Image (cartoon, grey):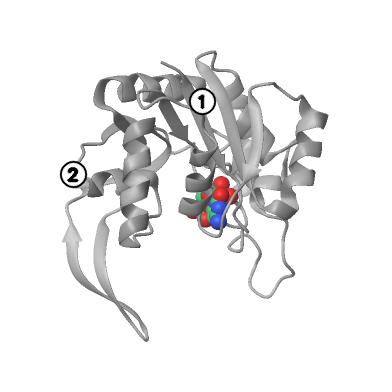
């Protein structure tokens, strides 16, 4: 059994720029300390000996930039750069097609913009996939979660979801390759677009286990997140 990793890194990072500001470099290419976010994320997976191969999905016009960053910060034979797509799901789908993996091999998907993941959580996710076939990292919700209906003025609450039933999904999200391939094929056939891979596997009626994560493993999304990530990174 081998472990593969897909890092979707083809996002445009449009939420990063303050409103009205000029377009930013996508957040996965911004510098955090002395390295780009993507390289820091990648290094976390390279530190795990069980990881056999890592595919990074990027936009076609970013391929050169990424190759250059990889050369500068230490190329590893386990890494390959592939072309991503217009949605995160499409980026993962396209990378999956490049994966020379058996159905019972494991594939982990991890956002390029979560550089604060740690080896122990990656290892626990792999262990959980070995047991359950599908597992994701998640953290309990600390806020009270409301279901709403959107209105022109904002939103109106329709219900309160008991907090003990809520987990906020993070990555890595790991699956047996055969299971994820089947989930992706079904989603494509039904025209379903999910915001994570677990939602595709849930649609098949397959159980997905949750591995406890940390709020530190947040997704760099908005202005200010980079400074917070830098603060945490100094503590590692
Ligand atoms: O947009 P979101 O915050 O969900 O992005 C999560 C991850 O998916 C990021 O690493 C981003 O680069 C990646 N992504 C992608 N292809 C897209 C959109 C997002 O690989 N078309």
Seen from the viewer's position, the closer of residues 150 and 109 is 109
Q: Is residue 233 visible?
A: no
Task: Identify the residue at horizontal 37%, vertical 40% (top origin).
Answer: 181
Say whether residue 30 is left or right of residue 146.
right
Q: Residues within 10 Å of mark 2 (few under 14, many from 20)?
A: few
Q: Which mark is residue 118?
A: 1
Q: Quadrant of the C terminus?
A: top right
Q: Residues within 10 Å of mark 1 (few under 14, many from 20)?
A: some
Q: Which residue is mark 2?
A: 205
Q: Where 137 sits versus 125, above or below?
A: below
Place of residue 142 in the rendered image (x, y in percent of width and height, measured from the top left): 31, 46
Residue 65 picture quarter: top right
Seen from the viewer's position, the closer of residues 187 and 233 is 187
Place of residue 74 in the rendered image (x, y in percent of width and height, measured from the top left): 77, 24
Q: Quadrant of the N terminus?
A: top left
Q: Secondary structure at mark 2?
A: loop
């Amino acid at each position: 059994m081998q472990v593969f990793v897909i890092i979707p890194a083809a996002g445009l990072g449009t939420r990063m720029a303050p409103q009205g500001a000029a377009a930013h470099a996508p957040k996965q290419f911004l510098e955090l300390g002395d390295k780009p976010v993507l390289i820091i994320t990648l290094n976390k997976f390279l530190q795990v000996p069980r990881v056999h191969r890592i595919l990074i999905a990027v936009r076609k016009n970013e391929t050169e930039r990424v190759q250059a960053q990889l050369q500068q910060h230490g190329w590893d034979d386990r890494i390959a750069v592939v072309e991503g797509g217009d949605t995160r799901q499409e980026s993962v789908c396209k990378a999956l097609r490049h994966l020379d993996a058996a159905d019972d091999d494991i594939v982990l998907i991890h956002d390029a913009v979560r550089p604060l993941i740690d080896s122990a959580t990656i290892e626990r996710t792999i262990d959980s996939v070995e047991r359950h076939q599908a597992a994701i990292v998640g953290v309990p919700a600390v806020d009270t979660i409301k279901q709403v209906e959107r209105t022109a003025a904002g939103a109106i609450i329709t219900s309160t979801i008991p907090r003990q039933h809520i987990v906020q999904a993070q990555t890595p999200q790991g699956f047996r390759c055969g299971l994820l391939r089947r989930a992706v094929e079904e989603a494509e056939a039904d025209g379903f677009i999910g915001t994570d891979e677990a939602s595709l596997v849930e649609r098949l009626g397959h159980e997905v286990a949750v591995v406890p994560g940390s709020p530190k493993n947040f997704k760099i999304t908005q202005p200010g997140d980079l400074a917070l990530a830098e603060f945490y990174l100094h503590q590692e």
